[in-house]
Structure formats: structure tokens, C-alpha cells
Image (cartoon, helix red, strand yellow):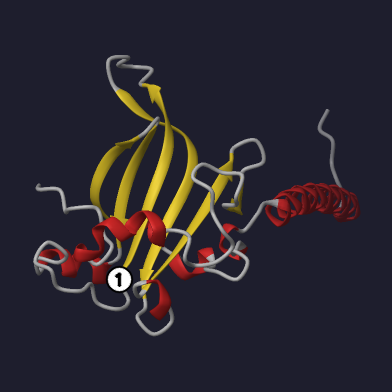
Amino acid sequence: MRMRLSFKDIGWDRRRLLRSAAASMVAAGGAVAVALAVSGSTAISAQDKYTVQVPNGLALSEFRGFEGWQVISASLDGPLLAAILGNPVMIEAYQAGIPGNGKPVPDGAKLAKIHWNPTKMETFPAATVPGTLHDIDFMVKDSARFADSGGWGWAVFVYDPASDTFRPGNTTDTPPQDNDAKCGLACHTIVKSRDYVFTDYGKR
């Protein structure tokens, strides 16, 4: 026996399906809103490292984009591994023979030295590789701004892996850091003839 549906029955079924679909969409939208709210609160609570500044000194924001700078060299700096990076102005200076030729580094040159705690590579234990981030050191050449410190400003930002945050270096760190832009002058004075720059450009 065939069951015959009237237009009225079909219309009722369609309205019921539409109501069910609308309810599902509302529920899904609510879930998305909750997910976005959670992810948004997480993003807000995370530190923006570029807001950190040394009191009376340099801000990390003055070195924005350093993560993409060209590698100048690498070193084993005491117990830490280090990579030394330079902005385009500094790289052009190296290509021109500075600082080895005794000429001054041009204003606008910037260097970053990233320190990591070393660790053994999990897949190749014979290799020692960067582990957790330790700190980042910066130098910037500005002859007018830093006339009383060889034309250079320095800053150190120490990283805390537990909180995933940076803080300015201070006098409790090794080496101790004062709250100004001259913190690197004392140790860099021995390379004054190289315009206070230790690192040579590694051949490649």
C-alpha cells in the first residue's frame, strides 16, 4: 500500500528539517565562538616580547625582525652556543671589509647574539645543537645617540623558558648588566680599534 503525502505534509516536514538545521548551526556557532574566545584569551596572556625594554636603555622593539637577519658567525661562548646575526647595514659593512680594515661601522648597523643552552641532537647524539634559549644580546650603532659609549648602544634580554617570557638583563646576571645602553662598553673596549666589534664574518 502506497502512502500518499499531501503538500501540507511535505511543507510540515520541510519546516521541521529547517528548524533542526538552524538549531545545529546555532550550536556549532556557539562552539566556534567559545573556541575563539579561549584562543583569544591565550593570545592576550602571552607576552609580546617587543614590549620589553631595558630601563633607561634599549627596547627589544628596536631590533624587530632580527629573527630573519643573516648569520655572521657562530661561537661556543663559555657554556653556551651562540649565533651572531647582522641587519643589512651590518652585512654590507662586512662586505666592504669593515671592521677589519679599521674603518668605522656605519650608523644604523645592528647585531644580535643569540645564546642557547647546548644539548645533544636526539637523532644524532654525536652532534651538539641549540637547546633552550638562554638570552639575546644586541648592539646598535648610533654615533649621536651613544656618543659617550663609542657610538654603540647595547642591551641584553634574558629568556625564561618556564614562562616563555623575556626580561632585561640586570646586575644579578653573568656578566652583570646595568640599566642603561652602555652595558657592553667595558668588555668591548679591547676591540676599540675594530669599532668595538669582536666578530669576523665567517667565510662561506
Residue drawn at the location 11% of the way across and 65% of the way down: 95
Q: Which residue is mark 1?
A: 109
Vertical comparison of 73 with 181: above or below:
above
Circle 1 residues within 10 Å: few <14, some 14–19, many ≥20: some
The reply, left or right, for residue 94 in relation to residue 38 is left
The answer to which of 24 and 92 lies nearer the viewer is: 92
Q: Label 1 sits on what residue type?
A: Ala
* Residue 15, position as x, y percentages in the image: 87, 54
User: Looking at the image, how many numbered discs can be counted on the residues?
Assistant: 1
* Residue 64, position as x, y percentages in the image: 45, 65
Residue drawn at the location 30% of the way across and 78% of the way down: 107
Vertical comparison of 14 with 57: above or below:
above
Residue reaching furthest to the bottom:
144
Image quadrant assignment for residue 195: bottom left
Evaluate whether residue 185 shows in this view: yes
* Residue 141, position as x, y percentages in the image: 34, 73
Residue drawn at the location 23% of the way across and 47% of the way down: 73
The answer to which of 192 and 4 lies nearer the viewer is: 192
Vertical comparison of 140 with 203: above or below:
below
* Residue 123, position as x, y percentages in the image: 34, 17
Q: Quadrant of the N terminus?
A: top right
The reply, left or right, for residue 76 in relation to residue 66 is left
Q: Could you say whether the residue bearing mark 1 is in a helix, strand or loop? A: loop
Residue drawn at the location 37% of the way across and 56% of the way down: 112
